[in-house]
Image (spheres, helix red, strand yellow):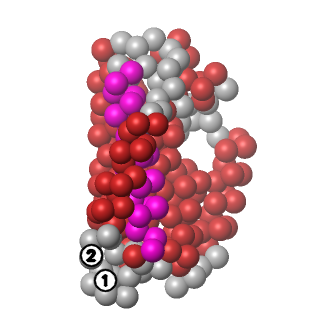
Amino acid sequence: LFSLQPFRDMIEGMRLDLWKSRYRTFDELYLYCYYVAGTVGLMTVPVMGIAPDSKASAESVYNAALALGIANQLTNILRDVGEDSRRGRIYLPLDELAQAGLTEEDIFRGKVTDKWRRFMKGQIQRARLFFDEAEKGVMHLDSASRWPVLASLWLYRQILDAIEANDYNNFTKRAYVGKAKKFLSLPAAYARAALSP
């Protein structure tokens, strides 16, 4: 089930980035995330392969791969708020910022407040839901592909933990997963990936 559409859509996402630097709603942001990262998930399923003994439908595996791309991009966005704002870009839903009592000026000011922490908790929670959805599909990939995909999912999800550990300061602190955590995650992911779907 190989399709050129994700490749075309990714190009559309690159074009979008040339002129669009604000997203009014999560629906708009989701579409951007699909274009630049969800497409990667869809492109990789034919390469990774679905396990021959999997009872899951191909559609559910593709949906999980799409969710992983979205989760990764949302994580990039949350990690890079400060860096993006210094380039005049805000990849956060403006309507949700407003509901939290925050403005574009607050983003550019880059000060961690209680309003910002509450807003970030909600954004992180949503990203984690996409990771959870993605994880359901990993075990249905071909056995040779499970470990690297699961390891990358677990490691990327830990960036969200690092944002929390930085007290939601993603303006001046870059969240990352330390070497020790990476080292511990790899064998755990390997053991989990070795199980049958």
Q: Which residue is mark 1?
A: 54
Q: Which residue is mark 2?
A: 197
**Label 1 secondary element:** loop
Amino acid marked by disc 2 = Pro
Q: Is residue 157 visible?
A: no
Amino acid marked by disc 1 = Ser
Is 74 placed left or right of 40 in the picture?
Answer: left
Q: Residue at x 60, y 26 (%)?
A: 83
Q: Position of residue 123 (x, y in %)?
A: 35, 36
Q: Is residue 69 above or below residue 28?
A: below
Q: Quadrant of residue 190?
A: bottom left
Q: Is residue 182 above or below residue 174?
A: below
Which range is magenta?
144-166
Q: Position of residue 139 (x, y in %)?
A: 32, 70
Q: Residue at x 55, y 63 (%)?
A: 39
Q: Are marks 2 and 1 in contact (CB under 8 Å)?
A: yes
Q: Residue at x 67, y 67 (%)?
A: 8
Q: What is the residue that sits farthest to the bottom in this orientation? A: 52
